[in-house]
Image (cartoon, rainbow, N blue to C red):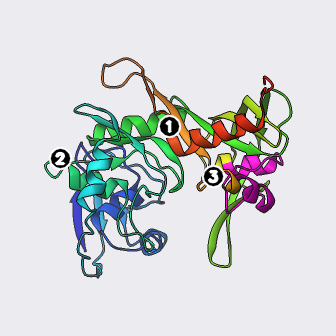
Amino acid sequence: MSHVSVSADQAGQRVDNFLLARFRGLPRSRVYRLLRRGEVRVNGGRIGPEHRLQAGDRVRLPPVDLPPPRPPQQAPTRQLDELGACILYEDERLLVLDKPAGLACHGGSGIRYGAIEALRQLRPNQPFLELVHRLDRDTSGCLLIAKRRSTLRALHEQLRTGAVKKRYLALLTGQFAGRRQRVDAPLARYERGGERLVRVDAAGKPAATVFHARERYPQATLVEAELLSGRTHQIRVHAAHLGCPLAGDAKYGDPQAEARLGDIGLRRLFLHAAELEIAPLDGVGARHFSAPLPSALESVLIRLRQQTLTPSPP
């Protein structure tokens, strides 16, 4: 057994994340097993994975056989150049990326590299770069990356308290009723044929999304979706729960609607993290970031407007 002390910079971390950083390459399931068995202790006591560490805490670590380190996967130079052009904002604490669709937030599970690995490659002298939150691989738009651990902790707290405002643009298929609909439906993860999915489930975690109609077409509606919680696939599952699944959604969508939209050029999930607002941070006032709708999605709207010569107002 060995013991380490928690530094001030590490304070506020969940112990499971602390262990994952300490034992890089160790499966998350193994970390949870160490905690369940009491092999990891904090100040001599057993703790659960959600326990938050404090500066000066003494953590007992068991001996662990780590898998050999895998050589880092390198993003091609062209993609690094493209990613550099997608940076919306950067200062000494924070970086905001307009993440392209098709790029995962991080590598793993067969993905050679993601946005965070590419950014570390792009900023080799930056000692700390961590994702504040995540977007689905097929979702584009505003993504927060912290450049200091203190900033990461502060933004995680804002996310927990709902101080971070997230607004998405989405194209819903079917008939969206009215101008505004709020969905309060708990979500739970499950597996089907080895694929991880999410569904509305009374035993799931609370989740709420507000949809506002922006522009209507004969068989689709452009909406603004405001997240009041941050669950995996939340907008996609809540939209399907309304009977209006997202356009381009291979997991939860309507195959017939997908075929029609494919005929006018939709080749991806129509979901874009258009706006993001954070509360005052490190003595700086509230900040608002926005990412323009990608041209591939804008061209789909143009074709829908051409099909509907006089779009009706919401």
The answer to whether residue 261 is left or right of residue 81 is: right
Q: Residue at x 30, y 74 (%)?
A: 62
- Disc nearest the viewer among 2 and 3: 3
Indicate the amino acid at tag 3: Leu
User: Eyeballing the image, is 144 above or below 193?
Assistant: above
Q: Is residue 93 left or right of residue 188?
A: left
Horizontal side, residue 36 vs residue 242: left or right: left
Q: Which mark is residue 174?
A: none
If you read the primary sequence from the N terminus, does the residue marked by circle 2 or circle 1 appear first?
2
Confirm whether the magenta stretch covers residue 243. yes
Distance from the alpha carbon under mark 1 to that under mark 3: 32 Å
CB atoms of marks 2 and 3 within 8 Å: no
Q: Residue at x 66, y 54 (%)?
A: 248
Q: Please name which of the two marks, 2 or 1, marks the residue nearer to the observer.
A: 2
* Residue 224 point in image, percent of width and height: 66, 32
Picture residue at 35% right of the left edge, 41% below the top? 86
Q: Residues within 10 Å of mark 2 (few under 14, many from 20)?
A: few
Q: Where residue 200 sits: x, y (%)?
A: 77, 54
Which secondary structure, mark 3?
loop
Residue 3: give x, y in percent of width and height: 23, 65
Rendered location of residue 286, percent (x, y): 42, 20
Report the amino acid beneath label 2: Gln
Q: Which residue is mark 3?
A: 266
Determine which of the numbered discs, if any, sits on residue 159 in the image. Answer: 1
Instruction: Identify the secondary structure beneath mark 1.
Output: helix
**Amino acid type, label 1:** Leu
- In reply to whether residue 65 is colored magenta, the answer given is no
The reply to whether residue 236 is visible in this rendering is: yes
Q: Do the CB atoms of the residues marked 1 and 3 lie less than 8 Å apart?
A: no
Q: Which residues are magenta?
A: 236-261
Location of mark 2 (residue): 126
